[in-house]
Image: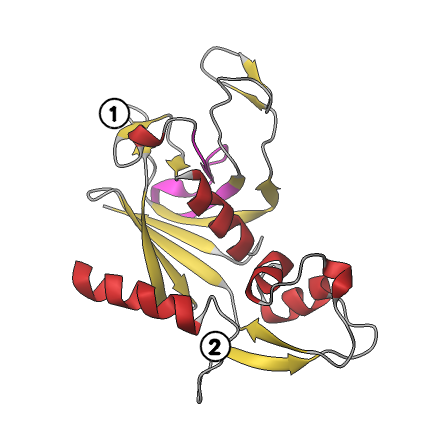
Amino acid sequence: RTFVKDQLSELADKWLFSREIFPDDKLCRSLQVKPGDQLRVIGKQFKVPYEALMEINNIRQPQNLRAGEVIKVINGPFHAKVYRSTFTMDLYLQETFVRSFRVGLGKPGSETPTGLWRVKIGGKLIKPVWTNPLDGKTYYPEDPDYPLGSRWIGLEGLEGAAKGRTGFAIHGTKAPEQIGTADSQGCIRLHNGNAILLYNLFEEGLSTVEVAE
């Protein structure tokens, strides 16, 4: 199973994360830019953040979009499933597997709640100020011991043990050695590069994360 997922991840680099478009692909297609088009609006139309379109099409700034050019667009949204028993997150574009990540999860007594979560509207933040609910200490991005890493993706609980829960998130880390362990206060930790990738792929209010055993 791991071998198959590795092969599919390699395929995703060509199928998804490049400008190439394969015949009969229902999830990716080309789009000719019309006068007045904006990347943010195109992203909303296809249920993916505009940052994903910028990355795939090598567009440095959103305003660099030019009428008449042809860009690659993705039919979103992206979703993920987290397995607590293996500290693994599987990323999907709609129902199609994209790749797997190692994650850090909640420590005993603060386990990451199972169930269905959704990326909160307004929940995607770059290095927000954070106050530790356990001791009240506030951390700023410039602090050497700032714990949240590169990105914060706030979640809201929809179903299962997650229902009604708030304050949980997917985020980066200052301690990459803790990825693959149960050492957080309940949040889902990722290597910082992977946190940036998910930040660029998850659409607020649409992307979901299922946490299972």
Task: Give the amino acid type for the residue marked by disc 1 in the picture.
Answer: Pro
Q: Which residues are magenta?
A: 154-173
Foreground of the two, 1 or 165? 1
Question: Residue 178 vs residue 209: left or right?
Answer: left
Residue 27's mark? 2
Here the colouring is secondary structure
The picture quadrant where one finds residue 124 is top right
Q: Name the spot of residue 105 as percent of width and height, x first.
A: 32, 34
Q: Name the spot of residue 159 as percent of width and height, x first.
A: 40, 49
- In the current view of this chain or complex, which residue is farthest to the right? 36
Residue 111 appears in the figure: no
Foreground of the two, 75 or 16? 16
Residue 108's mark? 1
Decide whether residue 129 is among the magenta residues: no
The residue at the point 44 percent across, 89 percent down is: 23
Question: Residue 132 vs residue 69: left or right?
Answer: left
